[in-house]
């Protein structure tokens, strides 16, 4: 899984996603959903591009599989 994540973080797609958060109004949250892979070897990794509220907490997110 680490290799997949390293490959993603060096991709053009990551640079595009990362650029959307430079204004301080959004953040990126990485997570996996182990329930999707229950009973098999499939590991699903997601990232969410989330808006931040005034206190800095992540709120509404658009989720993507990577």
Image (spheres, helix red, strand yellow):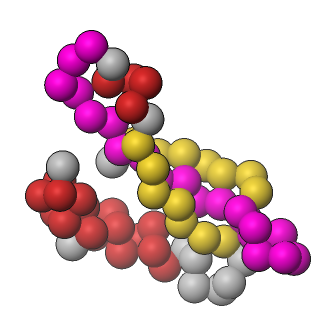
Is residue 42 shown in magenta? Answer: yes
Residue placed at 39% from the left, 23% from the top?
Answer: 36
Q: Quadrant of residue 7?
A: bottom left
Is residue 63 positioned above or below 13 on the image?
above
Residue placed at 60% from the left, 70% from the top?
Answer: 27
Q: Quadrant of residue 22?
A: bottom right
Residue furthest out toward the bottom: 23
Q: Position of residue 43 (x, y in %)?
A: 27, 34
Is residue 45 positioned above or below 20 on the image?
above
Please state if 44 lies on the left or on the right of 60 as rendered. left
Is residue 24 positioned above or below 29 on the image?
below
The residue closer to the viewer here, 30 or 25, is 30
Residue placed at 12% from the left, 58% from the top?
Answer: 3
- The stretch in magenta equals 39-58
Is residue 51 positioned above or below 35 on the image?
below
Residue furthest out toward the left: 3
Q: Position of residue 49 (x, y in %)?
A: 58, 59
Q: Position of residue 2 (x, y in %)?
A: 17, 58
Q: Is residue 11 visible?
A: no
Please state if 11 lies on the left or on the right of 36 as rendered. left
Q: Position of residue 34 (x, y in %)?
A: 39, 31
Please state if 32 lies on the left or on the right of 42 as rendered. right
Residue furthest out toward the right: 54
Q: Is residue 12 visible?
A: yes
The residue closer to the viewer here, 20 or 7, is 7
């Amino acid at each position: 899984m680490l290799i997949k994540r390293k490959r993603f973080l060096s991709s053009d797609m990551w640079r595009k996603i990362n650029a959307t958060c430079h204004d301080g109004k959004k953040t990126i949250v990485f997570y996996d959903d182990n329930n999707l892979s229950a009973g098999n070897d499939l590991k699903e990794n997601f990232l969410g591009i989330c808006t931040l509220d005034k206190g800095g907490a992540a709120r509404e997110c658009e989720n993507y599989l990577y």
